[in-house]
Image (spheres, grey):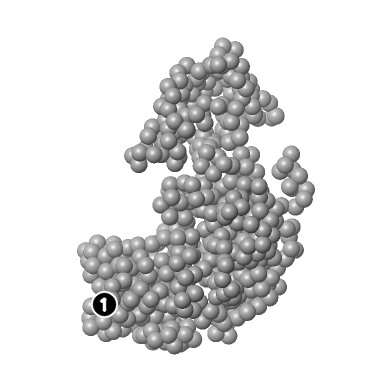
């Protein structure tokens, strides 16, 4: 089959690879009908996630049709012919984390858990196409994929919604939603979202459906801010404005009640010297992440507010504003999304027309052109917000 | 050499004890254990792989069996590597899960075999026990040792990097896996 493979930093290539086979009894094989490039794939492309290997198949946002099931898959849960969306974290459904609906912290799905444990103190769940640290699972930017614990993970679709309407249930819609949900939004809340990429846009939409009084989008790409403005959100371009001052102005000096970091470890900064400081530290590996969105969110947030982090961090950050966090009674909440928890309720919101995930799609490409899609998305060319690939 | 390891599984102590009591299951998740055969109600014969395609064997006898709470054993006289072990099954604070606490003791033999064994276990022998316990948890909670394309070998996990790339195995590799 054809698959988009990681070759080296800044290089992916569509290659011919073997078709997947069942490795565990509860596996299924899915023929992929739609897949997407995620912002977090750019962290892999850029070489900031360790344990990538030449030939690793990329991709953790995919859906399709079940073409084979292992002998251990409960037929009442999944059968050949089912149309499914596959969540990016692989969950066993049986461990304590899964029973607590903390699916992205599954204790059993990562065969390389020992390595993750050394880096993070405790293991991480397996994730499709996301380095060997999260298990070394082949990803979904391919014609077929093997899906472990197929009786637990995939969402079966019974409605006739199009692929584009439901594809993002695999990751970015639940991720954005969890970012907003962790904010415990009240009807009087002003919610500021750093990053107007796909996850940021969905965090804004989710803040709106959860009842926020006002939603503010922070980015530097005019086309991304325009996309947010078209939905009625207030925008702040950090290249033109000092973010903290702008946020104070927009909130009567209070600061946003809730702040969402939808950027993560590769943030860019309006102030060149601060950006350079973090870029150099990251380059010489004395800091793994560039955390100034996190810093800015913490220092901007209203006292007693919540800072919710859904942008991906991979290691250690420098100059964490612990004083602001502690003295002003801020709550910091975070997590890789527990996608399985949100798929069905969000599908229902899509069916009711409360959320329209297709609004962020700007590019539709055949799988063969995945490398071009990565280039456009990374370099923010041609107004690229979200690339959907068709195998 | 004494190794300690612990894990918590979402099954009650009685069930986890029963799983450990059936020693024949050990080879399915313990990397170096090739075969365990019961030779009597309280005795068993162990075959464990050692470096350079060698195999060490011993007979073991249960020294304590307290259903639902404690198992201990020791090798009998004439073992290639004298060893003993103990597993405690402790109900976790949630009231339904079990904390499994394992202690293994090896009298590392002198001479070439002892040195080879030490090398085999590496600088961090506890890692082997931790990995065995992780697979034990996978088996008792999910039914099987979990495999990925990058780490498809199950209990024969190869610790070294690079791994197999995260892409499906070729027919030749699949045959090797099934062998």
Q: Which residue is situated farthest in the top direction here?
A: B77
Position of the C terminus of chain A, as image quadrant, is: bottom right
Residue at x-position 50% and y-position 50%: A93
Q: Is residue A355 left or right of residue B91?
A: right
Q: Nearer the viewer, residue A379 or B151?
A: B151
SS at mark 1? loop
Q: Which quadrant of the figure has residue A319?
A: bottom left
Q: Residue at x 45, y 67 (%)?
A: A345
**Residue A285 in picture, x, y percent from top left:** 48, 60
- Return the residue at label 1: A188
Name the residue at the right extreme: B172
Residue B177: tell me if it is visible. yes
Q: Is residue B73 above or below residue A146?
A: above
**Residue at mark 1: chain:** A
The quarter of the image holding the N terminus of chain A is bottom right
Comparing A375 with A304, the one in front is A304
Give residue B144's position: percent from left, percent from top.
Answer: 59, 42
Instruction: Examine the image and state in which quarter residue A368 appears.
Output: bottom right
Quarter assignment of residue B119: top right
């Amino acid at each position: 089959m054809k698959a988009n493979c990681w070759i080296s930093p800044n290089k992916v290539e569509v290659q011919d690879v073997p078709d997947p086979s069942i490795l565990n009894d509860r596996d299924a094989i899915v023929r992929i009908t739609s897949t997407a490039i995620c912002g977090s794939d750019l962290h892999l492309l850029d070489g900031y996630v360790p344990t990538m290997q030449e030939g690793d198949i990329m991709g953790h946002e995919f859906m399709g049709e079940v073409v084979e099931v292992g002998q251990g898959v409960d037929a009442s849960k999944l059968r050949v012919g089912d149309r499914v969306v596959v969540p990016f974290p692989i969950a066993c459904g049986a461990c304590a984390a899964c029973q607590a609906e903390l699916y992205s912290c599954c204790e059993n799905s990562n065969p390389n858990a020992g390595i993750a444990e050394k880096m993070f103190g405790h293991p991480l769940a397996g994730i499709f196409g996301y380095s060997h640290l999260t298990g070394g699972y082949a990803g979904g930017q391919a014609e077929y994929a093997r899906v472990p614990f197929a009786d637990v993970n995939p969402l079966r679709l019974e409605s006739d919604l199009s692929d584009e309407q439901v594809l993002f249930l695999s990751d970015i819609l639940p991720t954005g939603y969890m970012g907003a949900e962790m904010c415990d939004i009240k009807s009087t809340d002003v919610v500021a979202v750093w990053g107007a990429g796909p996850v940021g846009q969905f965090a804004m939409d989710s803040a709106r459906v959860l009842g926020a009084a006002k939603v503010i989008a922070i980015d530097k790409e005019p086309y991304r801010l325009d996309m947010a403005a078209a939905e009625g959100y207030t925008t702040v371009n950090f290249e033109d404005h000092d973010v903290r001052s702008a946020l104070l102005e927009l909130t009567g000096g209070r600061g946003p009640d809730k702040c969402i970091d939808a950027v993560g470890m590769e943030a860019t900064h309006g102030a060149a010297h601060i950006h350079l400081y973090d870029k150099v530290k990251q380059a010489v590996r004395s800091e793994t992440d560039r955390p100034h969105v996190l810093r800015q969110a913490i220092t901007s947030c209203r006292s007693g507010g919540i800072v919710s982090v859904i942008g991906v961090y991979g290691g250690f950050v420098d100059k964490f504003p612990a004083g602001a966090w502690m003295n002003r009674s801020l709550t910091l909440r975070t997590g890789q999304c527990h996608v399985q928890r949100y798929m069905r309720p969000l599908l229902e919101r899509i069916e009711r027309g409360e959320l329209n995930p297709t609004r962020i799609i700007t590019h539709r490409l055949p799988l063969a052109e995945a490398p071009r899609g990565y280039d456009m998305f990374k370099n923010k060319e041609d107004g690229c917000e979200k690339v959907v690939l068709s195998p | 050499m004494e190794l300690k390891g612990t894990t918590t599984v979402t099954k009650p102590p009685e069930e986890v004890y029963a799983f450990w009591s059936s020693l024949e299951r050990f080879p399915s998740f313990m990397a170096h254990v090739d075969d365990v055969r019961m030779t009597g109600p309280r005795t068993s014969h162990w075959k464990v792989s050692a470096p350079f395609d060698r195999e060490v064997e011993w007979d073991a006898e249960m020294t304590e069996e307290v259903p639902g709470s404690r198992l201990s054993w020791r090798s009998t006289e004439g073992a290639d590597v004298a060893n003993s072990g103990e597993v405690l099954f402790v109900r976790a604070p949630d009231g339904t899960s079990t904390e499994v606490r394992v202690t293994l003791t090896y009298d590392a033999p002198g001479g070439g075999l002892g040195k080879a064994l030490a090398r085999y276990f590496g600088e961090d022998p506890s890692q082997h026990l931790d990995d065995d316990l992780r697979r034990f948890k996978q088996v008792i909670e999910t039914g099987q040792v979990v495999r990925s394309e990058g780490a498809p070998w199950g209990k024969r996990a190869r610790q070294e990097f690079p791994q197999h790339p995260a892409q499906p195995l070729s027919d030749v590799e699949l045959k090797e896996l099934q062998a």
